[in-house]
Image (tube, coloured by chain):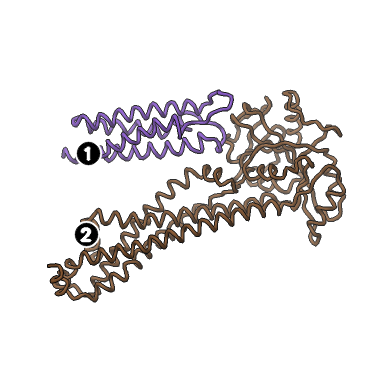
Amino acid sequence: MKKQVIPAIVMLTLSLVIVIGSQTFLSPCVHEDGSSGPCHWAGQALMGLGCALGVLAAIALCVKRARPGVYLSGLPVCALGILTPGTLIDLCRMSTMRCRMVMRPAMILLFSAALLCALAGAVLTARQKS
Amino acid sequence: MKKFSLPLKNLTRKPGRTSILALLTAFLAFAVFAGSAVVLSLRSGLSSLEARLGADVILVPSEAQSKVSFQNMFLQGTTGAFYMDASALDKALEVEGVEKAAPQTFLASLKADCCSIKIQVIGIDPEKDFTVQPWIARSLTRELGDMDVAVGCKVEADVGEIIRIYEQRCKVVARLEATGTGLDTAVYCNMDTMNALLSAAEEKGVSHKISSGDRVISAVYVKVKDGYDIDAVASRLNGHIRKVTAVRTRSMITGVSDSLAGVSRTVTVLIAAVWALAFIILLLAFALIVRERAREYAVLRLVGASRGMLGRMVLLESALCGLLGGVIGVGAAALLLFPFAQLIESALKLPYLMPDTARMLLLAAGTVLLSVAVAALSSLIAAYRLSRVDPGTALREGN
């Protein structure tokens, strides 16, 4: 297996965890009355970004020629994923709430790992070309 | 640097072997760093709780003797409100042995008010208070004004922001330092603000009225004079004031302290078990590696390497593996401990306050050093046996 494919596989796995997690085990707060707070929209945005990351990873896996560009375009997606919970979209106002306690740190870690993968992929493909 | 070049080459040329050894030590470092950090955080939390309680006895209405829920208010920040006549304060001051007493009034906000969940609002008398006021004074140099609130560090509101409690606009004037207790999730105001909030709550249908009158408080914090027996004063308070229960703060802390001792014991046993297991595995791994590489060492001896040089090389290789593993283990533990500190606190249901950065850095450095030492120690026997092997025999055995 070529080294350049490994970051794409890891990115794809991470994106799956992000998409599934944002709706299940890493989901934002669930209010008893069924209403949705701002953290709900942060969760939806994270799911969207996870999907985008997954598509990019799939392209990097399948289309060899597109790899360098795809890895580079993964960087802003991951940066957005890191900034979305709490910075770009508000979360609930208590640190003890699920969105701040679980969703935010987990998503920041997952998107940071994906960012490192995208960087590694970009470096590996650039090395291969040179 | 030259003496590191051969061990470094040996490690980089065999990435699989190096990774397994590093992973083993990483496992060790993870267990030590994470376990020690959790125990240290729990100890800091307990000290912080002791400092914040400040009083020797707390007087609460008898119906609130649900001491468990009272304890939960401090430990987990669960909301609760109970009221008694404000005259309990004056009556407490009449009791022999009471040095000072300060009232507090509790009110739980509505869910929709500011934070999607209920928060505890605590009214204090800044002039009399000796428990919360010193803590507030560290973040706010002036007294709390009317409709001013100081928020615990877990309430995500900035200074200058307006939060609504029962439709009343309250200005955040300070964010308080972390205590690792339930007090971090509360909002603090003076008694005038609290009275305004109680009236607003009344309009919303949240009743706090009691039969004896309108001036209500929730608790009286009592400091006992030096030389007086706290239990005796608590009994006198119970006898002197009707429908009130005196709770010794020590009894609350003892419960927490017992739980902490239990957690500490479990963590220590787990760390010891992990260390013993990993040490034995490392010992075996190095013994096997040295045997497997017997011919390689024999060739090195034949080209002029002394026994001491070979021994040092094995020790250096294992120490470098320990260093790598130590850094990975501490890094992985930090990635879980710091971002998920709140989750750990909620799961433990005990006061949890992370030590300061300097102490954590010291702990991290200590853990890495320990990993290096253990890795080097476990290869010591292998290095000694290696220095005893005759190169000729080793080469013949290899054939």
x and y, in percent, of residue A35 in the image:
55, 23
Image point (68%, 48%), residue name: B134
Please indicate whether residue B135 sits to the left or right of residue B333 in the image: right
x and y, in percent, of residue B282 in the image:
33, 62
Which chain does purple denote in the image? A
User: Subunit of mark 2?
Assistant: B
Marking on residue A72: none
Q: Specify whether disc 1 shares its chain with disc 2.
A: no
**To which quarter of the image does residue B289 belong?**
bottom left
The quarter of the rendered structure image containing the N terminus of chain B is bottom left
x and y, in percent, of residue B310 in the image:
23, 70
Asked whether the viewer can see residue B358, the reply is no
Image point (32%, 34%), residue name: A75
Q: What shade does chain B have?
A: brown
Marking on residue A4: 1
Q: Considering the numbered disc 2 on the image, is that residue within a helix, a strand or a loop?
A: helix
Image point (34%, 59%), residue name: B323
Q: Nearer the viewer, residue B158 or B17?
A: B17
**What residue did someone put label 2 on?**
B9
Query: What amino acid type should be assigned to the residue bearing mark 2?
Result: Lys
Asked whether the viewer can see residue B145, the reply is yes
